[in-house]
Image (cartoon, rainbow, N blue to C red):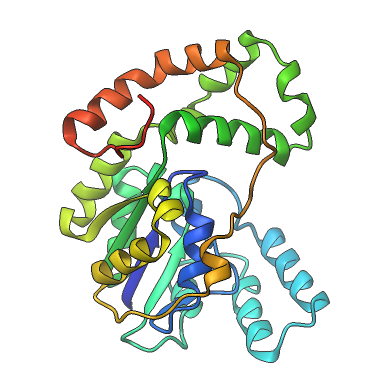
Amino acid sequence: MIENLLIGAGAMKAGTTWLYKQLAGHPLIHFTPEKELHYFSYQEAVGNKLTHAQRQLKLKKALKRQCNEKVLAWYTRYAEPEEINDDWYYSLFQEVQPRVYCADFSNQYSLLDEAGLNKITACAKNIKVIYTLRDPLERLWSHVKFNYKFNGQEELIHSINIKEFRQILNKEWFWKNTEYLANYDRLVRVFGKEYVRLFYLEDFTAFPTGSLWNIEQFLHIRHVDYKHDLLTSKFNQSKELDMPESWQRLAMIRLRPEYEQLYVRGLNHPSWRY
């Protein structure tokens, strides 16, 4: 069993990569060579990124990069078993000292049902969960652009019609990322309110140092100085494109209830446009 586990369950396109880049430099937070392990989502068949073939491919890439001996030993443990289980997961953190947080960031974790989340609780004594949010409309548009970019079709975004955009919104896997409140409440029910903390991409941008200080307070770890150039950097950016007004109107019809519920609960960010 892991002593201290930090779960990054941020919404897709809501600043988890920026957060990872900052926290990877903290001596009391340990990230594995693969930032996103996806173990618990794979166990629940939410995504398929941990097949034996895919893990073997990651090992081959590490060999090509001529990684050092310690990293190659980690990739060997990561890639070797055909079937993976909790013991395999523990082995990925076997060299971490007890006082250090083992960090496991995956956007898919916020989409797990309670049974899937409960499997996380069985693997660690102390668990803290960070759930990062972003203005729902801005996040949705960034997610659309990322999806087209991932499929090599970024230049085609503005050529699709409103019917095709509606089809994207209606995809279950896509829309679940927008259901902040349901995802947050599920995390709280499983882990406990004091162990789950919301953070906002808007604060990462406007107050990076203060945001990281708040995370350190949440984790009860000492403050460190972060690299200034990383604090102001942006990662995984999609092409700068304006969302067509007709798409905005359609998206807001779907998003309005989510905005309203977040405002009622006081879980919104003051900069959100709604």
Residue 274, placed above or below residue 173: above
Residue 187, placed above or below residue 161: below
Q: Residue at x 49, y 68 (%)?
A: 22
Give residue 186's quadrant in the image: top left
Viewer-closest of 253 and 210: 210
Give residue 135's quadrant in the image: top left
Side of 256 where 142 appears, left or right? right
x, y percent for residue 261:
23, 27
x, y percent for residue 236:
63, 51
Residue 152, placed above or below residue 66: above
x, y percent for residue 26:
44, 79
x, y percent for residue 116:
35, 50
Q: Residue at x 49, y 79 (%)?
A: 91
Side of 209 where 262 appears, left or right? left
Q: Residue at x 60, y 79 (%)?
A: 77
Say which quadrant the N terminus sits in.
Answer: bottom left
For the question of whether residue 122 can be seen, the reply is no
Say which quadrant the C terminus sits in.
Answer: top left
For the question of whether residue 64 can be seen, the reply is yes
Give residue 223's quadrant in the image: bottom left
Q: How many marks?
A: 0
Viewer-closest of 265 and 182: 265
